Image (spheres, grey):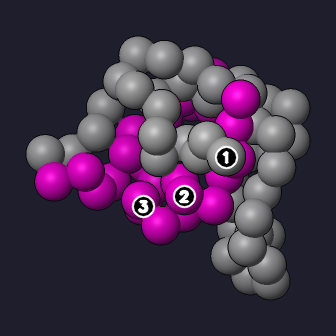
Amino acid sequence: MKTLRDVEIGQAAKVVKLHGEGAVRRRIMDMGITRGVEVTVRKVAPLGDPIEVTVRNYELSLRKADAAMIEVE
């Protein structure tokens, strides 16, 4: 299983599934990350947290823990 956390800088990936449940999953979906959407990793902070991505034509920062819940292909 490949997650958004594993995607290299500059690479794009398609969201396959969101793991997690409750408020965390709802928050990720509210940010525009849903099944089938393309996400491009733009930057990663020096210590790896947070990760900046482009989704639906806007920039978004995600924690590593949240990125690990997003399964991609």
Quarter of the picture holding the C terminus: top right
Residue 70, percent from left and from top: 66, 52
Left or right of 16, for residue 4: left
| Residue 67 against residue 43 in the figure, above or below | below
Seen in the picture, residue 17 relative to 64 is either above or below; the reply is: above
Name the residue at 40% across, 26% down: 8
Mark 2 or 3 closer to N-term? 3
Q: Could you say whether the residue bearing mark 3 is in a helix, strand or loop? A: loop
Task: Give the magenta range.
Answer: 47-73
Residue 68 is labelled as: 2
Which circle marks residue 63 in the picture? Answer: 3
Specify few, some or many for label 3: CA neighbours under 10 Å numbering under 14, 14-19, or 20 or more.
Answer: few
For marks 1 and 3, give the one nearer the viewer: 1
Is residue 56 visible in the rendered image? The answer is: no
Task: Give yes or no for residue 30 being in the magenta stretch.
Answer: no
Q: Amino acid at mark 2?
A: Ala
Helix or strand or loop: what does disc 1 sit on? loop
In this view of the protein, can residue 28 be seen by the observer? yes
- Confirm or deny contact between disc 1 and disc 3 (CB under 8 A): no
Name of the residue lying farthest toward the bottom = 22
Query: Residue drawn at (57%, 19%), measured in percent from left and top?
Result: 12
Secondary structure beneath dot 2 equals: loop
List the residue tagged with mark 1: 1
> Which label sits in the foreground, 2 or 1?
1
Q: Could you tell which of marks 2 and 1 lies nearer the N-terminus?
A: 1
In the rendered structure, which disc, 1 or 3, sits on the residue that comes first in sequence? 1
